[in-house]
Amino acid sequence: MTLDDYNSFCASLPSTSHVVQWGGAHVWKVGAKVFAIGGWSEGKEPFVTFKCSDIAYDILKEQPGLRPAPYLASRG
């Protein structure tokens, strides 16, 4: 996935808006609520943080290469 791929996908969703903030992160919102944050680490590997349902979270956190966002530590 490239940054353009990420932004194109998020832009295709209804009622979304885009802003670059927090040191260059590409932040996507519906209304004033953030649903996805994308950026690139110092390496070439992308990182993307997004909101998901509790069920999706339980499945995704077990997948190789994925981890919960550090600021969501309260979810376990």
Image: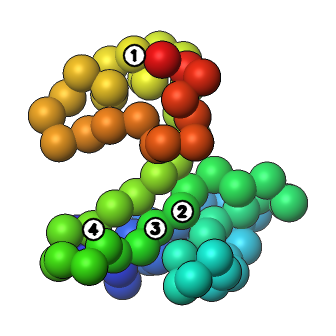
State the separation of the CA atoms marked 3 and 4. Answer: 8 Å
Image position, residue 66 (x, y; %): 26, 39
Residue at the disc numbered 3:
38
Residue at the disc numbered 4:
46
Residue at the disc numbered 1:
58
Q: How many other residues sit within 10 Å of disc 3, few (<14), some (14-19) or many (≥20)? A: some
Residue nearer the viewer, 76 or 35: 76
User: Residue at (54%, 76%) from the top-left corner?
Assistant: 26
- In the rendered image, the quadrant that contains the N terminus is bottom left
Residue 45, above or below 74: below
For marks 1 and 2, the one nearer the N-term is 2
Left/right placement of residue 18 relative to residue 43 reads right
Image position, residue 23 (x, y; %): 57, 83
Image position, residue 73 (x, y; %): 53, 29
Residue 5 visible? The answer is: no
For marks 4 and 1, the one nearer the N-term is 4
Label 4 sits on a secondary structure element that is: strand
Label 2 sits on a secondary structure element that is: strand
User: Residue at (19%, 69%) from the top-left corner?
Assistant: 45
State the separation of the CA atoms marked 1 and 3. Answer: 21 Å
State the separation of the CA atoms marked 2 and 4. Answer: 11 Å
Q: Amino acid at mark 3?
A: Gly
Q: Quadrant of residue 11?
A: bottom right
Image mark for residue 37:
2
Q: Amino acid at mark 4?
A: Pro
State the separation of the CA atoms marked 2 and 3. Answer: 4 Å
State the separation of the CA atoms marked 1 and 2. Answer: 20 Å
User: Residue at (79%, 53%) from the top-left corner?
Assistant: 33
Q: Amino acid at mark 2?
A: Ile
Label 3 sits on a secondary structure element that is: strand
